Image (cartoon, coloured by chain):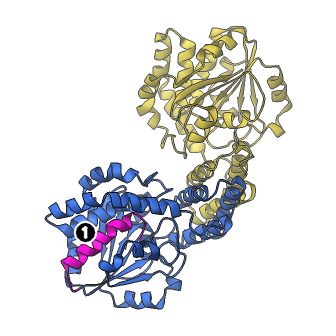
Chain colours: A blue, B yellow
Amino acid sequence: MKIQTECVPCLLKRVIYETKQSTKDKNLQTRAIRNACWVFSEIYDPNTSSAIIATKVHKIVYDTLGDKDPYKHLKNQSNVVAKSLLPKVEGLIKASECPLKTSMICSIIGNMMDFGIAGSSAKPEMLKNVFKKTFDEGLGYDNYMPLEKLLKKAHNIVLFTDNCGEIVFDKILCREIKNFNTNIFLTLVVRGEPIISDATIEDVEELQFKEVTDEILTTGCFAIGIDFRNLPSKLDKSLKKTDLIICKGMANYEAFSETDYRPIAYLLRTKCSAIANSMNNPIGVNAIKVYE
Amino acid sequence: MKIQTECVPCLLKRVIYETKQSTKDKNLQTRAIRNACWVFSEIYDPNTSSAIIATKVHKIVYDTLGDKDPYKHLKNQSNVVAKSLLPKVEGLIKASECPLKTSMICSIIGNMMDFGIAGSSAKPEMLKNVFKKTFDEGLGYDNYMPLEKLLKKAHNIVLFTDNCGEIVFDKILCREIKNFNTNIFLTLVVRGEPIISDATIEDVEELQFKEVTDEILTTGCFAIGIDFRNLPSKLDKSLKKTDLIICKGMANYEAFSETDYRPIAYLLRTKCSAIANSMNNPIGVNAIKVYE
């Protein structure tokens, strides 16, 4: 997705949020905010991907703060909250006529746990209050059937994770994918370095993702979504031979929507109008969208 | 008011809004947005008044766009909408036991017509839909009684206007002030140059403010609120001898709250948390607040 004008104030909101997560030092906060503005003044361009610009903005902020992981505490909290909801999720899946679809919806609801932007949650605990309501909404954009068809015939799939918290539900999703088609070789991809509240290798190791996946790779570097100019060769090979890419969340959409990888399925909560419009989806809904 | 972190994305939202009001040329829009970010990167400082920073940000945007009045069309529309509501306002004042207070509330409701920021209206027409509901809310912060006391004994008052649209109701307010205390010499102040949707001398001349005021001055220059370093000598003298300053809207609060002028009364809709917090008022209410 090319950056939209509205992404600029939204990204700055997130920068301010992470700055305050990282430090109480007002001078340091001010330097970080000023530097983020400076990056925008240098590289803002409606012909550039929002993911590329956001990566550079967050990079200078993290460097200015001297903080490799301003969201560390929030990420841990998000995982704790999501784990507390696991019995509810397992109950829904057990009671469901279509456990795979139900696991997808739960994993999309997990995508609401995202911080510092409009349409996201203020605190990880919020998910507990909105889970039932959001589950009852079902899918506001429903490409489940074409996705199920692709999964039926797939041998290799690559699944890109997004935030901590939702990663807990993604594990259930991985298990249900493997239950649905036992022939699938499932490659999971997490971020190469901590960036915003996204899951890294430590998170999936702690959550024992080995039990439900065949391979775990990383994006290899500090990037919102994926930096395709710095793709690790292993991930590059996986993407070339895969039958299906599944992307959780908005950042992966922002990056992959600039490429020709197909078929690709996006599972996300449409939290902002820029992405909702770009996907031609309503805003504020649970969405499964497949591009074949 | 010192600039708050949240003012940065909010101001950028407004910059984007005015840029789109001014031109469809994407390259020009991009240059304006980049330049606004550059100004922030140079001067953002939590020890500086939000009005001073906002003035410099809007200045570079107007200069980049080569547009002296990006809100021209919206300002005209706002006056048209407000005029269409005049019979309703006059009816309320006629039926009121306290016409002065009622005229203040109506004038504060007019302050909702403000564009490109959160808590404001998307279109001038919106005021028609929310007028009754907002009137019925009454005052969420009510210093009417101390203000009435000050008006009772005042000989000279200076009233600073804010946006177009609301200026139509401000005329009724001026009339009611003069009705309330016929001894008052009422000086009205509008912006010295077009800036955002604020009223200028053309607006008050067209609306025949001479009928209800004794003197009309301007702030003398391009500024959000008032630039006290460039105060015209006439206005400076008026402020020194006045018994009471009345300020409509948030921009005047942003500027005057950095000074010691007293007594001063703010009549506004608290549209953002930065100003609501600074005034120790709830957000989203009609407020009369007096500092003696």
Badge 1 density bin: few <14, some 14–19, many ≥20, Cα 10 Å: some
Q: Quadrant of residue B3?
A: top right
Q: How many marks?
A: 1
List the single residue furthest toward the left.
A97
Question: Can you give x and y, in whole percent of width and height, for residue A184 in the image?
Answer: 25, 84
Question: Can you give x and y, in whole percent of width and height, for residue B54 in the image?
Answer: 69, 47
Instruction: Assign the C terminus of chain A to one quadrant of the image.
Output: bottom left
Chain of the residue that carries numbered disc 1 in the rendered image: A
**Residue at image location 29% in from the left, 75% down from the top:** A174
In magenta stretch: residue A6: no
Q: What range is drawn magenta here? A: A162-183
Kindly tell me whether residue B35 is visible in this rendering: no
Q: Which residue is mark 1?
A: A143
Left or right side of A235 for B223: right
**Residue at image location 46% in from the left, 62% down from the top:** A76
**On screen, B219 above or below B176?**
below
**On screen, B102 above or below A41?**
above
Give the secondary structure at mark 1. loop
In magenta stretch: residue A173: yes
Left or right side of B239 for B176: left
Front position in the image: B35 or B280: B280
**On screen, A135 above or below A158?**
above
Q: Quadrant of residue B261?
A: top right
Left or right side of A121 for A33: right
Question: Can you give x and y, in whole percent of width and height, for residue B259 in the image?
Answer: 77, 32
Kindly tell me whether residue A232 is visible in this rendering: yes
**On screen, B96 above or below B112?**
above
